């Protein structure tokens, strides 16, 4: 390992030590009870709520996946996806956060998403809770694997080490950290990591733009590539198969592109549909439930939106400027996701520069840790709290629940590692599938649960199953057919789930008076006095 690489590694180790320190600080408080471990005792302030929600949401996808999309095929896909995410973030904070915080208290002080849905419909046989927990396990295992892929790519690219070994090391680190501190440690470190992430993005985009000759030069270079700077067109790299991987052709030292592809309404709708995912994203929704005061959500919304807009815009632009500075550095779709790393290591290669590079690289590590610990913790809580204690062993003690949680964390991590073994995995693709799964399974149900009193338990069950089922059907069977079926699976699945919820709810007996009274109390804001400890 060369001197520069050693300096980068030292900086990253220092960063990881700080993160572990946070876990140790909060470990004692987190382990007092399962409520503290899973939801932090509803004690988050507005800044931590906002920053941890967005950091856990964006993951390494923000620093690697999104710039990679912009680098590979230009502005359209990346920009419309970013716009959809920004709009979805705002609407989620605006209309869902306050009512969910209030309703989760009314719903017998629910501290997990499956428990909220189950208590919302006052079910006795826990069908909703079991199904919700199973879906969370499935999709968060896939989601966690995308974070492990990020770890593997990061360390393999930086240090020239074996991808699989580095991916496993990253997974072990995240697992140990999550077991230590639970939700409070996760949220506190996510706050710090959100700052690291946005700082890293801004520093690199400024340096890259200056190196490229300014924004005008970046734009001129992008215009020279057919469809690269179009909102309604898409650049198409000319590729050939090399070692079973589609690789961009290079001629005379320049990457070759074909004619720009058409980019119509369906393509835009497909990318904008990413915003729908927020309504069903457990790691974000839990922050709404965990904030200490409902009135602080307005400030949190403003903080979150500033962070999201800046981060998404900068991430997209990094892909564009990266294509100018390093046009042939990454010739595969998977490799394109390393452009942020390439820019960073090239700018900080002399003197004490590698130390700064290490801390900036920690931005990717920060994004990965902040997401994967959320995914692992929520998935483990879904099984331990909702299936083990909620269904299988209702008299389980807190100590038993915590033990099952840690065992579940280990199992999920192992499965995630197995999924992430392929080093040609594209982070963006893995995330998009898991995002669609959560968005379609829980998004429509969340909105109807909070805003439509006529929603029934049968409608809730049918909506979850149909949404999740449609994601798999559309992705695996219909999407390969192309044409209109090429649209992102979240959109048709979200619509289908919504229709099913409405139809089944109208065809079944209306909710009981107790359920309707709960809904009316939440709408009227009369909930604090009804809190019942679990």
Image: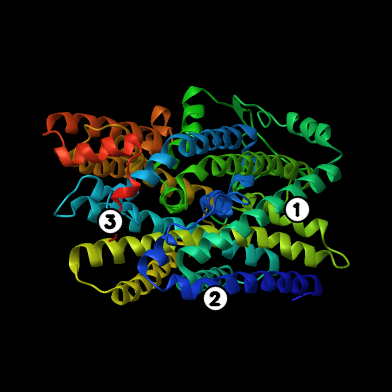
Q: CA distance from mark 2 to mark 3?
A: 30 Å
Q: Quadrant of residue 414?
A: bottom left
Q: In the picture shown, does residue 231 fall above or below 444?
A: above
Q: Quadrant of residue 188?
A: bottom right
| Pair 2/3: label in front | 3
Question: Any mark on residue 24, and which?
Answer: 2
Question: Any mark on residue 532, and which?
Answer: 3
Q: Position of residue 179 (x, y in %)?
A: 45, 73
Q: Quadrant of residue 352?
A: bottom right
Quadrant containing the N terminus in the rendered view: bottom right
Quadrant containing the C terminus in the rendered view: bottom left
SS class, disc 1: helix
Left or right of residue 55: residue 347: right
SS class, disc 3: loop
Left or right of residue 192: residue 291: left
Q: In percent of the image, x 46 and y 63: which residue is there?
A: 183
Q: For the view shown, which residue lies furthest in the left direction? A: 509
Q: In percent of the image, x 62 and y 41: which residue is there?
A: 312
Q: Nearer the viewer, residue 271 or 242?
A: 271
Q: Sequence-wise, which precedes: disc 1 or disc 3?
A: 1
Q: Position of residue 43 (x, y in %)?
A: 47, 58
Q: CA distance from mark 1 to mark 2?
A: 34 Å
Q: Sequence-wise, which precedes: disc 1 or disc 2?
A: 2
Q: Which residue is mark 1?
A: 343
Q: Could you classify mark 1 by the number of other residues whose Cα lies within 10 Å: few (under 14), some (14-19), or many (20 or more)? A: many
Q: Position of residue 477 (x, y in %)?
A: 32, 41
Q: Could you classify mark 2 by the number of other residues whose Cα lies within 10 Å: few (under 14), some (14-19), or many (20 or more)? A: some
Left or right of residue 506: residue 220: right
Q: In the picture shown, does residue 513 fall above or below 188?
A: above
């Amino acid at each position: 390992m060369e001197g520069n690489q050693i300096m980068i590694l030292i900086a990253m180790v220092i960063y990881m030590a700080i993160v572990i320190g946070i876990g140790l600080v909060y470990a004692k408080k987190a382990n007092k009870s399962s409520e503290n471990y899973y939801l932090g005792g509803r004690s988050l302030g507005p800044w931590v709520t906002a920053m941890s929600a967005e950091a856990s949401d964006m993951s390494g996808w923000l620093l690697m996946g999104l710039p990679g999309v912009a680098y590979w095929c230009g502005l359209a896909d990346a920009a419309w996806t970013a716009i959809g995410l920004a709009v979805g973030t705002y609407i989620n904070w605006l209309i869902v956060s306050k009512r969910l915080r209030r309703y989760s208290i009314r719903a017998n002080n629910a501290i997990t998403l499956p428990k909220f849905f189950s208590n919302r419909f006052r079910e006795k046989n826990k069908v909703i809770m079991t199904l919700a927990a199973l879906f969370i396990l499935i999709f968060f295992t896939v989601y966690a694997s995308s974070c492990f892929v990020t770890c593997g790519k990061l360390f393999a690219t930086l240090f020239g080490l074996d991808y699989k070994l580095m991916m496993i090391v990253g997974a072990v680190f995240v697992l140990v950290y999550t077991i230590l501190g639970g939700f409070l440690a996760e949220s506190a470190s996510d706050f710090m990591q959100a700052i690291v992430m946005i700082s890293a993005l801004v520093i690199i985009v400024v340096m890259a733009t200056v190196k490229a000759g300014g924004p005008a030069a970046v734009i001129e270079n992008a215009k020279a590539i057919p469809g690269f700077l179009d909102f309604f067109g898409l650049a198409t790299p000319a590729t050939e198969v090399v070692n079973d991987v589609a690789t961009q052709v290079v001629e005379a030292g320049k990457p070759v592109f074909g004619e720009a592809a058409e980019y119509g309404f369906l393509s835009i709708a497909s990318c904008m549909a990413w915003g729908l995912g927020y309504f069903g994203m457990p790691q974000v929704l839990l922050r709404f439930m965990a904030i200490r005061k409902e009135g602080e959500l307005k400030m949190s919304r403003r903080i979150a939106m500033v962070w999201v807009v800046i981060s998404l815009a900068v991430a997209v632009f990094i892909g564009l400027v990266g294509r100018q500075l390093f046009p042939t550095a990454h010739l595969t779709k998977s490799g394109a996701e390393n452009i942020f790393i390439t820019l960073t290591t090239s700018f900080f290669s002399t003197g004490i520069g590698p130390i700064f590079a290490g801390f900036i690289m920690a931005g990717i590590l920060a994004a990965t840790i902040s997401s994967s610990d959320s995914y692992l913790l929520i998935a483990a809580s879904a099984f331990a709290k909702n299936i083990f204690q909620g269904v299988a062993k209702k008299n389980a003690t807190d100590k038993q629940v915590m033990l099952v949680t840690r065992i579940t964390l280990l199992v999920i991590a192992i499965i995630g590692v197995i999924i992430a073994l392929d080093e040609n995995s594209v982070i963006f693709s893995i995330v998009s599938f898991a995002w669609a799964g959560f968005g379609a399974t829980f998004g429509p149900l969340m909105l109807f649960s909070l805003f439509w009193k006529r929603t029934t338990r049968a409608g809730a069950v049918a909506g979850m199953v149909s949404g999740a089922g449609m994601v798999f059907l559309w992705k695996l069977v219909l999407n390969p057919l192309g044409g209109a079926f090429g649209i992102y699976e979240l959109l048709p699945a979200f619509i289908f789930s919504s229709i099913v919820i409405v139809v089944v709810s109208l065809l079944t007996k209306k909710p009981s008076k107790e359920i309707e009274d709960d809904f009316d109390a939440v709408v009227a804001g009369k909930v604090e006095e009804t809190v019942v400890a679990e």
